[in-house]
Image (tube, rainbow, N blue to C red):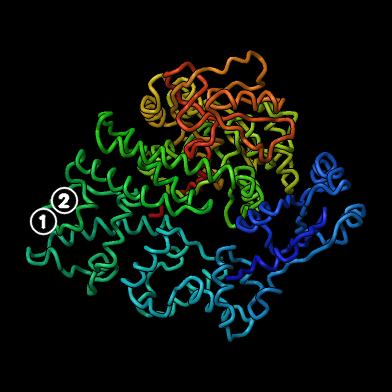
Amino acid sequence: MSTWRDVVLLDFQEPVPALSLAADPDHLLLDEVLLSSLKDRQVEFIQYNDPVSFRYLFESRYRQAIAEKNIKLLVQVRDVPLEQLPYDLLQMGRQLTYRLQTIFPKLSPQVVKQLTAQDLDALYAVYGQYQGSTSTAETCAFILHRVYKVAYELIDDETELIKFLLSKHYRQIQYPEIIESYLIEQLQKQKNLTKLPLAEMVKSATFFYQTLQSQWVAYLKTLQEQPAGWKENGQPRGFYSQEKVHPFDHEDVYRLLDNLFIEGYLKPVAGFNSQKLPGWTHVGLVIDPASDDKHRLSSLVANLKEKLPGIGNYRDWLQVMPLYAEVKDLILSIGFNQKDAILMEAQAVESEMDAIFETWLMRNYSSLQNLPYLPKPVMLHQVPHYLASRHHQRVALVVLDGMSYVQWVQIRKYLQGQNFAFTEQGVFAWVPTITSISRQALFTGEMPLYFPHTLGTTRKEEAAWKLFWENHDVFKNYTGYHKSFGQGEGGYQSHAILQQPSIKVIGLVIGTIDNLVHTALQGQRGMYGELKLWLESGYLTGLLNELLDKGFAVYLTSDHGNKESRGIGRIAEGVLAETRGERVRIYRDKMLRDKAAASHSAIPWPGTGLPEDVYVLLAKSGEAFLPAGEVVVSHGGISLEEVVVPFIHVTRQNK
């Protein structure tokens, strides 16, 4: 079946000109599938954003190749009309224009423009059936019904609402803002829902899960008080009212609750007699902690194993990573005999997952850097752009150097007990996953190819951070940066920079976890205990509380993750490699890199987004360039734990 992408691909049938300039105000070209199709046709893609950066890249990499007609280059132009491009570009290339209104002329452009590429796929398939006007309301109604499959007029009581929201938030479905507002407006017309906080429940998964958690306790208390004969098919009081059947008592609802408890969205509660409660509630109870943990681990591993064959795009990996992190956190927190069957199964699934991820990343990583940073950033260098687009008041970015998603699960569990709440997602770090490359990309807002002279150091990141915000209309005097080891006598002590009322934007680097990584003599299990002690010191809690008290919108992220690996033998090259890490080696000569790759178990990285004279050799998952058998926790490679890191909006729990 044809798709909307065919409109673009028709312009790239052979023979393809050496240079194509495409006006793309609706960001149609920033689609993972389309970029992959263009790559298959040997079409290179770059964006025209900052004129100075573009000119540097164009002159250094592309001008001569275009003149010799040995390249097919597509330049996406979003923010300026094509006629305002430099004269030499207009003379060299053909001019193209792509607009959503051309593809979907009967629908409201304002609504369609907010859809993701995948939403557009579904819309394109049913567009021929649309008989309405170009009004916002009719377009929203059509898309909700036919694209998202939401029959909102049938959501007319609390049970139907909870069923809908369980599905929406668990599947991490995010509607465009204009469609979400329309949906809330329609739900508010239902008389049985008027007393509920509908806007918060629809918009915020965090708020919804907090509500379910508190109502779960209230529900269990009510259920336990019922006569014995009501236990399996009772009808306790309603979710928000005294008269109605409780939504939790509906089979379609409690079946959906299982995964929420297993995957950590909801927490089992203690203090209830399981023998007095129906069997389906036991997943949400603390009965026998050791047995509960083993059952939960088994269920998590089964869920993870089930998801691996269906992975097709980056969004799938962003959903797999939190699930895998829960598996690893559970293993580290409770400890298992190395010969335990469930532990061996978890390790086998981890190996399979990393093998699939490695293959996928080698093919698709180059497409990620061009994806849009709205509605959510995909890569680390997009984070400051996202923050600049969302916040015009005070914003703080806290970078826990070296924190993997696994460590984030441990941190989150601790902070939830300190009355913090989180909206979380994953983003892709830069490869190789070392601090000087990936964190520098985070603070510059640029791909590494734009900072070739500081690729091996972080000494310029404060200046780069301030320059980024200055380019987004925040003066340097209003932008702060501070790097610390996250330690202080007696816990957290405020830094002087936070006492400056003029600061509007601040970047904070905390080096504790990276220090734990590089001194982890007992592997990740030893790190787990050390991280627990650091959290209990109160440093992170104190910092987050101060930032929130001072009115900052607080975001927490990492520059890369970490991986426990075992040595396979050193590569004896002396000083031939410029960077000699445990899981990565960087060369300035391609022949040297390729020679090392041919004689060792290693991966030659394609060099996506890196300067031209940087050639990277990566250790395979679970391996390190160390003496055979030596165990280390390190980073630099392309395992899922190293590449996909958390990006968290931190708030306080809504009471």
What residue type is disc 1 on?
A: Lys
* 548 lies above or below 622: below
Image coordinates of residue 560 in percent, x first then y, are 54, 35
What residue type is disc 2 on?
A: Phe
* 191 lies above or below 380: below
| Mark 2: few/some/many CA within 10 Å (<14, 14-19, 20+) | some
Quarter of the image with the C terminus is: bottom left
Image coordinates of residue 134 in percent, x first then y, are 64, 81
Q: Nearer the viewer, residue 39 or 342?
A: 39
Does residue 424 appear to the left or right of 337 in the view shown? right
Residue found at x 70% / y 43%: 469
- Circle 2 — which element? loop
Q: Nearer the viewer, residue 87 or 589?
A: 589
Circles 2 and 1: CB distance less than 8 Å?
yes
Image coordinates of residue 125 in percent, x first then y, are 56, 74
Q: Nearer the viewer, residue 461 or 194?
A: 461
Tell me the residue that label 1 is attached to. Answer: 276
Image coordinates of residue 348 in percent, x first then y, are 36, 38
User: Which residue is the extreme one toward the left?
Assistant: 228
Q: Which mark is residue 272?
A: 2
